[in-house]
Image: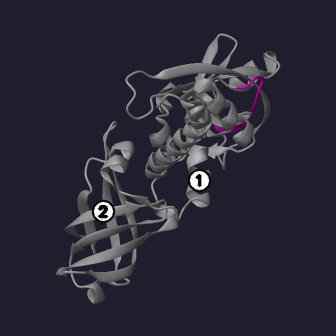
Amino acid sequence: MGVVTSQKITSYYERFKDISVTFTKEIIQVTGLLTQQIHLKCGNDFWPCVVYSASFQNARVVANVKTGLLGKLQTANNIASLRFSFKPPGETNAVTFFVAAKVIANGPYGNSQDVNIFTLQFSNRPPDDFIEIVGRVLDANVNSAKRKEERIPLTQDNLRRLNILSSESAVFIEKVPRRCILRDISFSGCKLIMLGVAKFLMDKDGAVRIDFNDPRESFLVNGKFIRAENVEGKREMVALGLNFNENEVPMGYKIRLNEMLTSTRADYRQSAVEEPADKKAAK
């Protein structure tokens, strides 16, 4: 995780406090949720559980009820706490904390007689670590829709900002890998250059590999070629526009782009604030 200011965390909380994140396999991966270390604590006892979904105000967890959990909750007036543990990509140490809560509902999970799903209402605002980890996902989701057509040209400066290893990459056309050079990327697609003939590549399915560093991650993003044109002066080359399949864009990729775009915007705002003072001092 990068350095996130208290203002940013407050912004995440105010904007997203009512929105729940479902902990799918992909969300577990990008947040670094350590599933084996999640427990529901009631009194002095711990019960392993699975986080189904969570927001900044509540959570839904799945747990086995054949272990005396229901009786313990009844004795404790449904007061409990939920133990979270995360190790986000690139981090050395895990972050572990408890969130105090009250169980406000429970019932069978699916058709199981052994497992229930519990709804927990948090007693207080959760720790900043939780707001930061979940807020990054929610912010990336919002901006990937709001700014999906915003192109990022892959200049040397932008490659450095994005921590992309190189503009040289690979594109898979009908599952056959081909070398390519990335020219720009966005939440919704990318432009690349490769050897080929434009008319034979239009409307074909493709997938581009994008390699990031710090931490090292590679994403294969599927899509369809919607534009193809010859490169002026290089008849053997073709410039292709790959439109990503919207529902298949990896969340980790969205987070990478979002953090670059929002940090760039923050730098611009900071410069705008500082500029009048600089001019004033120069006079």
Residue 216 in the magenta stretch? The answer is no
Secondary structure of the residue carrying numbered label 1 = helix
Name above or below for residue 271 compared with residue 205.
Answer: above
Q: Residue furthest front?
A: 283
User: Residue 239: percent from the left, percent from the top?
Assistant: 30, 76
Name above or below for residue 111 compared with residue 70.
Answer: below
The quarter holding residue 181 reads: bottom left
Please give the residue where the numbered disc 2 appears in the rendered image: 182
User: Which is nearer the eye, 216 or 259?
Assistant: 259
Left or right relative to 276: residue 27: left
Magenta stretch: dominant SS?
strand
Q: Which residues are magenta?
A: 114-125
Please give the residue where the numbered disc 1 appears in the rendered image: 143
Secondary structure of the residue carrying numbered label 2 = strand
Left or right relative to 74: residue 169: left
Residue 264 in view: yes
Q: Residues within 10 Å of mark 2 (few under 14, many from 20)?
A: many
The mark nearer the N terminus, 1 or 2, is: 1
User: Residue 203: percent from the left, percent from the top?
Assistant: 38, 83
Q: Which mark is residue 267?
A: none
How far is mark 1 from mark 2, CA to CA? 22 Å
